[in-house]
Image: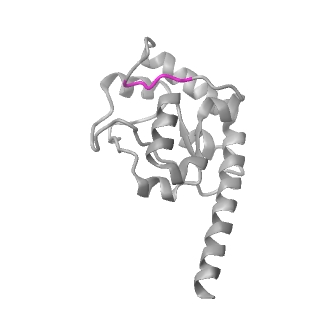
Amino acid sequence: MREKINEKPDSGEWVIESAGTWTQDGMPALSQTLQVAQYFGLDLKDHRSKQVTAELLSRADLVLVMESGHLEALQIEFPDQSTKIHLLSQVVDGNAYGIPDPYAGGGKQEREIAIELHDVIARGANKIIRMAKTNHKNRTKKSTKKSAKRSS
């Protein structure tokens, strides 16, 4: 996603991170995932898994998930962050459908999943950027209001 978003002229200085709902920190990418990444010209040999945390979500302007189970789990576990958590397909296409987690597969091969994910991100990069910018502005306004109340 980082490469696709950074291609856009109005992408800004976004920090794009990957984190898992049900993972352990520090796990390397699967060998099949490394091969598929090479197909797209990406090198993930140094990539390590990271679990979603409250601290990670609090820094985020926008959180995109691939599956409805991820959406539901994060919204339940982190209700104070739920307004920024969205299903990728819903943001891009306006339709709620899941893109299988490559670790789970869902009956699809890693390459099929990667191609689908690449296509969705390519189609929706502008929408993703707009939504992140809007969320960032809203979050900044809330932060400014809280600071003003504390100093009063």
Relative depth, front residue between 94 and 78: 78
Q: Residue lying at the far top in this picture: please name it.
A: 107
**In which quadrant of the rendered view does residue 38 lie?**
top left
> Is residue 105 rendered to the left or right of residue 124?
left
> Where the C terminus falls, by quadrant?
bottom right
Q: Which residues are magenta?
A: 98-103
Residue 98 image position (x, y, % from top left): 55, 23
Quadrant where the N terminus is found in the figure: top right
Q: Nearer the viewer, residue 8 or 106?
A: 106
Position above or below: 67 against 46:
above
Q: In the rendered view, does 28 fall on the left or right side of 108?
A: left
> Main SS type for the magenta part?
loop
Q: Is residue 28 left or right of residue 16?
A: left
Q: Residue at x 71, y 51 (%)?
A: 10
The mark tally for this picture is 0
**Residue 127 percent location from the top left of the image:** 71, 40
| Residue at image coords 54%, 21% | 115
Toward the viewer: 74 or 34? 74
Q: Position of residue 84 (x, y in %)?
A: 59, 48
Compare residues 143 and 40 and report the one nearer the observer.
143
